[in-house]
DNA sequence: AGAGGTTACGGGCAGCGTAAGGATC
DNA sequence: GATCCTTACGCTGCCCGTAACCTCT
């Protein structure tokens, strides 16, 4: 009948390359999926999928139909999101988040989501951007707030915020209250993000060019841990300015101005989603993340943590 | 459920401003329409239409939904037209045609339509463009091949051909075989389209400016009749060049070159359709008309009649 | 033998039509 | 009372799940 349900079933069979997998995804039995596809093929009077052990692959007609199916399903989701009473929307959004975001406005975002979609469940996964990227691409998370943009097919990147990397130190470290040189700074160990992160790599690139020998670096995958170590006077912390607002405010950490501040990498975050016709909630959450980040910056209030 | 059928029912209720009229249009009973709308309103948890004696009018939410409904239905029709086996398409297209088109390539178009959509019924209405225009706007015809374009909301105009108006005469009339002056020409009566047509008006405008007194004009609503009268030597026929190809070819009528040939109005035809999400067949026919006209001109063959 | 898809069959429910019941002019 | 919509109710047909069967590795 070419109705929405059939298109949805077809979409998932095509996307997951299998009747069985589509059936699981759609919470129905595999014969039901078979029947829908058979009906679709009869209506269009052509084969849409070649069945093989390896998996169902689309025929030419199938590819053509898939294009329409995606457009229809997307339009439908859009309509539901726009018109359906938001408070009635149910579902689960798996949200991947970089730790920096956790320490800034994630809680604001969660409050906002819950206010608008009280029946939606949020699952949060905190990891470094590289891992989040893979999880997004493989569909393990629906939205990722990370250092973007991600260049992969069907990924939509929504810029949300852009924080400069800055150097911080405990007053106990005794760094002078003026613009310091690279040499002065590198007398202390650098405490920063883990080696697999982009800010780490960009930072190393810049520091390596300035000093004769590589600086001592303590790379740490936990932002809290970096802050802790910096507070303890182990060295100079290099993190996003926003991550230590509280410590800076209370005077426990000082901003260290350096001669290469203007050359420091910026952490550009994006809310990235996989462009799928279902789960428009993911896009909605991405949009909320954008507005939350903007609001948080406007307020310029030192958020808790 | 916000499925396609519900949207279709809603679309027609909104468009026709009434449950009853929508029911007739959709060949279903009025309670069934009520039920679908009620279900839609329940799903969206809001009223979509205000019922009043005068007719159902959309609420704000209703207007919003209508936009989505149109987009969805249109996309659906597009999909069906693109994927569905064309030979399986059923339906009726009411086609309004100007007489000039009838005398040129209409039969080619009908053959083409029948070859592609054997199960589609074509109803043909021949009239002058002004009448066709009204019939199209009021929905009495689905496609109109007429002197366009039509400037009315939701009308799509597809240019199909552009024929110059020319003067013709029977050799018996004795007009010289050279470029004649307006005065020489107007010594004879002018036989042309009916007074309610655009070419008549444009022609009169041009002739009036050139001669002291208005020319004698036999306006005739029937093209065959115009040709007949011209053949009989009653006067000078002024019609689209293409309409008398056969007579000209057989030598029964001659082209009369005039000093104002270059200033003659051109008959620009369009295939015009009402932009409705259903009846994509109309658009398909319009497109076929365009290609048929182009093919006919390329062949430059004097088509029968 | 096991994974993946098809065929066969029965039950539940959505959606339609018929018929009767308001509401508003 | 005429028109337009809603409510009530029974029926049909679709769609799904269960279960058995097919096919290929």
Image (cartoon, coloured by chain):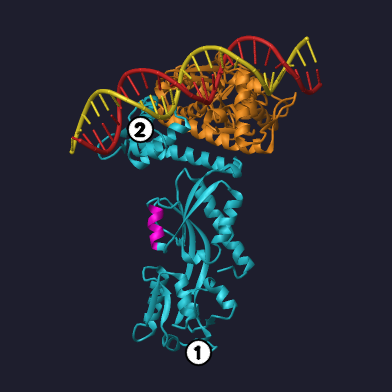
Chain colours: A cyan, B orange, C red, D yellow
Q: In this view, does A61 lie to the left or right of A114?
A: left
User: Which is the main secondary structure of the residues drawn in magenta?
Assistant: helix
Image coords of residue A204 (percent x, y): 38, 76
Visible in this render: residue B184?
Answer: no
Q: What's the chain of the residue with tag 2? A: A
Image coords of residue A179 (percent x, y): 52, 87
**Residue at 61 percent of width and 23 percent of height:** B33
Q: Provide the secondary structure element on which disc 2 rests.
A: helix
Residue position marked by numbered label 2 in the rendering: A30
Which quadrant of the view contains residue B84? Answer: top left
Residue B12 magenta-drawn? Answer: no
Image coords of residue B186 (percent x, y): 65, 24
Query: How many numbered marks have been drawn onto this rendered protein structure?
Result: 2
Q: Give the range drawn in magenta.
A: A130-137
Q: Is residue C14 left or right of residue B55?
A: left
Residues A46 and D12: in front is D12
Q: Provide the secondary structure element on which disc 1 rests.
A: loop
Mark earlier in primary sequence (2, 1):
2
Which quadrant of the view contains residue B118? Answer: top left
């Amino acid at each position: 009948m070419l109705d929405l349900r059939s298109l949805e079933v077809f979409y998932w069979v095509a996307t997951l390359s299998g009747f069985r997998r589509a059936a699981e995804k759609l919470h129905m039995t595999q014969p039901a999926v078979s029947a829908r596809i058979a009906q679709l093929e009869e209506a269009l009077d052509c084969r849409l999928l070649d069945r093989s052990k390896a998996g169902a692959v689309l025929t030419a007609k199938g590819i053509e139909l898939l294009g329409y199916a995606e457009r229809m399903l997307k339009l439908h989701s859009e309509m539901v999101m726009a018109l359906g009473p938001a408070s009635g929307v149910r579902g689960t959004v798996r949200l991947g988040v970089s730790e920096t975001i956790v320490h800034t406005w994630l809680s604001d975002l969660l409050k906002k989501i819950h206010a608008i979609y009280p029946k939606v469940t949020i699952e949060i996964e905190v990891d470094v951007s590289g891992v989040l990227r893979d999880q997004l691409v493989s569909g393990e998370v629906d939205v990722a707030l990370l250092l973007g943009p991600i260049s992969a097919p069907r990924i939509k990147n929504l810029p949300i915020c852009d924080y400069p990397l800055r150097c911080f130190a405990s007053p106990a470290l005794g760094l002078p209250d003026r613009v310091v040189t690279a040499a002065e700074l590198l007398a202390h160990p650098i405490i920063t993000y883990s080696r697999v992160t982009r800010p780490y790599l960009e930072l190393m690139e810049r520091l390596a060019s300035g000093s004769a020998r590589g600086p001592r670096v303590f790379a740490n995958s936990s932002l809290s841990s970096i802050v802790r170590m910096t507070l303890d006077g182990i060295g100079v912390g290099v993190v996003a300015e926003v991550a230590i607002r509280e410590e800076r405010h209370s005077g426990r950490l000082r901003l260290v101005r350096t001669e290469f501040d203007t050359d420091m990498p910026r952490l550009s975050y994006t809310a990235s989603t996989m462009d799928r016709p279902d789960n428009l909630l993911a896009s909605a959450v991405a949009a909320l993340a954008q507005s939350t980040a903007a609001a948080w910056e406007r307020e310029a209030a030192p958020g808790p943590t």
